[in-house]
Amino acid sequence: MTHFDTWVTFPYFSVGAIILWCIAGFLLFKSEKKSSKEKIALLVALGGVIMIGAFITILWISLERPPLRTLGETRLWYGFFLSAVGLIAYLRWRYKWFVGYSLAMASLFLLITLSNPDTYNKALMPALQSPWFVPHVVVYIFAYALLAASSLVAFHGLYQHSKNQLVQETLDMANNLAYIGLGFLTFGLLFGALWAKEAWGHYWTWDPKETWAFLTWLSYLTYVHLRYRHPDAIKKPLWALALSFGILLICWFGVNYLPSAQQSVHTYTQ
């Protein structure tokens, strides 16, 4: 199967996964905890995750390169990781709204990729032919999935706080997701510096993409600092966590549209 044929099959994988996630969501919200219906729902949802994982694997083989070059390709990974994070978090905290959000967002990213067909290019420019390329991007996308989830939990916590219904579990969930996400984000930043040294001869050049990556890391570090220094504060750290996701989105998507990014060495889609 050629890489073109593989992308042609993407609607079958993506629509199949979305249908499975819709069925899983319906069953889950109708089920009781630890019931057989809940177990079936989780298995069905897992089936959707496996379908996207299988497509990424097949695409990787047919492209003969890691499918991590374009925004469309990274959206596949985001949908895969976000749905996986949702299931893992549900097994830990049993929040139905959270797994529903994760599967819905993963479906949205697949639909965006469906409506914006990617280029079917096997070429990988020299700068991307580095052993640091795959760990840097995969770790980053995984961190993005965790941090997106943490920001949603922050909004949920702010809502609970406004109704005087905030529970400790929500704060614990936000903390765990943000701390783990920041850890992976830090690894991604370090891997990126090592990659830059090999590709361009410098660890850091304050390129627009690098600057926004640093701002993103700094914003989540601010949340950690607020939680550590002011453990009894609620609204300020939750707002910091919720708004950090906006900076993350600028770093991921928005920076490509900034005039200063036209000369960025991190533009790979042209």
Image (cartoon, rainbow, N blue to C red):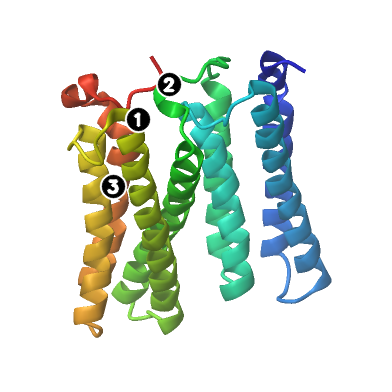
Identify the residue position indicated by label 2 in the image. 126
Which badge, 1 or 3, is on the more N-terminal residue?
1
What residue is shown with label 1? Answer: 199
**Badges 2 and 1: C-beta atoms under 8 Å apart?**
yes
Helix, strand or loop for disc 3: helix
The CA distance from mark 2 to mark 3 is 31 Å
Secondary structure state at the residue bearing disc 1: helix
Answer with mark 2 or mark 1, whichever residue precedes in sequence. Answer: 2
Question: Label 1, label 3: how many angstroms apart (C-alpha)?
Answer: 29 Å
Residue 180 x %, y %: 43, 65
Label 3 environment density (alpha carbons within 10 Å; few <14, some 14–19, many ≥20): some
* Residue displayed at 55% across by 40% down: 77
Determine which residue is flagged by label 3.
246
Up/down of 106 relative to 74, above or below: below
Looking at the rendered structure, the kind of residue marked 3 is Gly
**Looking at the picture, does residue 49 appear above or below residue 122?**
below
Depth-wise, is mark 2 or mark 3 nearer the camera?
Answer: 2
Sequence order check, earlier mark of 2 and 3: 2
